[in-house]
Image (spheres, rainbow, N blue to C red):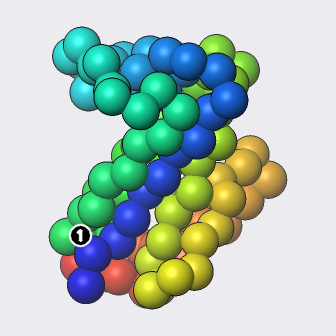
Amino acid sequence: MAYTVKMYSRFENEIDKFLGLFFNENFNLENKHFWKKDYENPIEIIDISTAFIDNREKFKANMWISLDKDIYIAISESNIDSLVKYIYERFPY
C-alpha cells in the first residue's frame, strides 16, 4: 500500500517554493496549485509534514496525508504532534 501526501494552494508557486526548500532542489511543477507524492514507508511522511508545519507561516498552502485508502487528514499545528505519535505507534518499523 502507498501512503500519500498532497499539497494544495490557491497561490502559484507556493508549493514549488516549499518543495524546493524541503528537497533542496529547484521545482517547477506543471500544476502550480497541486502536488501529490506516494511513499512506500509511512514514516517518511513525518519529515515533510513536520517541515511543513515548522514553516507554515512562510507558505500559503495546505497539506493532507493518507494512511488508509481514501481517508485524508489535514495537517495542522494542532494535530501534528498527535499524528507523528500515531504514525510511530502504528508503524513501528
The answer to whether any part of residue 22 appears in the image is no
Nearest the viewer among 79 and 40 is: 40
Whole-percent x, y for residue 44 in the image: 30, 57
Q: Quadrant of residue 24?
A: top left
Question: Residue at 53% of width from left, 33% of height from top?
Answer: 33
The answer to whether any part of residue 9 appears in the image is yes
Q: Tell me: residue 22, above or below residue 77.
A: above
Nearest the viewer among 41 and 16 is: 16
Q: Is residue 59 rendered to the left or right of residue 77?
A: left
Q: Residues within 10 Å of mark 1 (few under 14, many from 20)?
A: few
Which residue ends up furthest to the front in the rendered image?
30
Question: Residue at 48% of width from left, 71% of height from top?
Answer: 66
What residue is shown with label 1?
41
Q: Tell me: residue 11, above or below residue 64.
A: above
Q: Tell me: residue 34, above or below residue 30.
A: below
Question: Residue at 28% of width from left, 19% of height from top?
Answer: 27
Question: Residue at 27% of width from left, 75% of height from top?
Answer: 2
State which quarter of the image contains the C terminus: bottom left
Q: Is residue 82 rendered to the left or right of residue 49?
A: right
Q: Tell me: residue 74, above or below residue 24.
A: below
Nearest the viewer among 73 and 80 is: 73
